[in-house]
């Protein structure tokens, strides 16, 4: 009996530790690092001090390719076998069987609720994002000095207009925005863009729960569940 109580206590402590870790992870920002440099686009994801490369993916070796094809073949065979068993177990059609219940139809009121709820969810999710450490370096070139000057002015106007619009939608923090007039053409290929996108999972979870609750309260969720 004492050993059983000790085991129960250990399990409860482990469960409490797991819950604490999950709560901490919900409040710790999850980050995505985007970078374009030297003609290569890179994406990394991580949390705290952990960074995992996502793109570009490393090329598979021949052995990995063979394993991947074998896994696909096994999954396809398993799926075909499952469908065949399902057809064998399917009972013959019964003419006396009552017709299936009609599904709920999407009304205009439900559509308005769905659109408004989706808009609110999108607004909260976009508002939860923090885009920081933005670095933009772009060389502006042309056929001659006059063309470079004209292109530089247009690019600067377009860039500041675009960034001003984005700053109304997202929370932005810039480290560097630098346009370089390239009169000689030696700066071609030196374009650089990088930023860090962060968000706390707890905000997204709360927004998602509120979205689902609104659909449930307005009976819109019945369209997907029944």
Image (cartoon, helix red, strand yellow):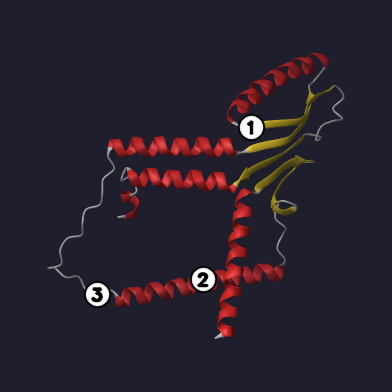
Instruction: Assign a secondary structure to mark 1.
Output: strand
Q: Which residue is mark 2?
A: 75
Q: Position of residue 107 (x, y in %)?
A: 27, 39
Residue at image position (43%, 72%) is 80
Q: Tell me the crowding category of disc 3: few under 14, some 14 to 19, or many 20 or more residues within 10 angstroms, Cα based.
A: few
Question: Is 99 above or below relative to 221?
Answer: below
Q: Tell me the crowding category of disc 1: few under 14, some 14 to 19, or many 20 or more residues within 10 angstroms, Cα based.
A: some
Which of the 4 image quarters holds residue 41? top right
Q: Name the front one of labels 1 and 3.
A: 1
Instruction: Assign a secondary structure to mark 2.
Output: helix
**Labels 2 and 3: the sequence-earlier one:** 2
Q: Name the front one of labels 1 and 2.
A: 1
Q: Position of residue 194 (x, y in %)?
A: 74, 38
Nearest to the observer: residue 33 or residue 126: 126
**Labels 1 and 2: the sequence-earlier one:** 2
Q: Which residue is mark 1?
A: 171
Nearest to the observer: residue 20 or residue 152: 20
Badge number at residue 29: none
Badges 1 and 2: C-beta atoms under 8 Å apart?
no
Residue at image position (51%, 35%) is 123
């Amino acid at each position: 009996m004492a050993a059983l109580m000790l085991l129960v206590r250990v399990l409860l402590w482990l469960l409490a530790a797991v819950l604490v870790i999950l709560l901490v992870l919900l409040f710790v920002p999850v980050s995505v690092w985007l970078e374009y440099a030297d003609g290569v686009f890179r994406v990394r994801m991580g949390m705290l001090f952990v960074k995992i490369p996502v793109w570009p993916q490393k090329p598979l070796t021949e052995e990995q390719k063979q394993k991947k094809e074998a896994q696909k073949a096994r999954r396809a065979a398993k799926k075909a076998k499952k469908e065949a068993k399902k057809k064998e177990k399917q009972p013959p059609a019964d003419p006396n069987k009552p017709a299936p219940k009609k599904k709920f139809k999407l009304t205009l009121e439900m559509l308005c609720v769905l659109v408004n709820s989706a808009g609110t969810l999108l607004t909260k999710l976009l508002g939860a994002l923090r885009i920081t450490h933005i670095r933009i370096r772009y060389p502006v070139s042309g056929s001659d000095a006059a063309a470079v000057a004209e292109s530089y002015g247009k690019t600067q106007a377009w860039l500041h207009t675009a960034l001003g619009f984005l700053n109304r939608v997202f929370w932005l923090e810039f480290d560097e925005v630098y346009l370089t007039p390239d009169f000689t053409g030696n700066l071609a290929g030196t374009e650089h863009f990088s930023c860090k996108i962060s968000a706390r999972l707890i905000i997204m979870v709360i927004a998602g729960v509120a979205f689902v609750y609104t659909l449930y309260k307005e009976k819109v969720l019945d369209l997907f569940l029944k």
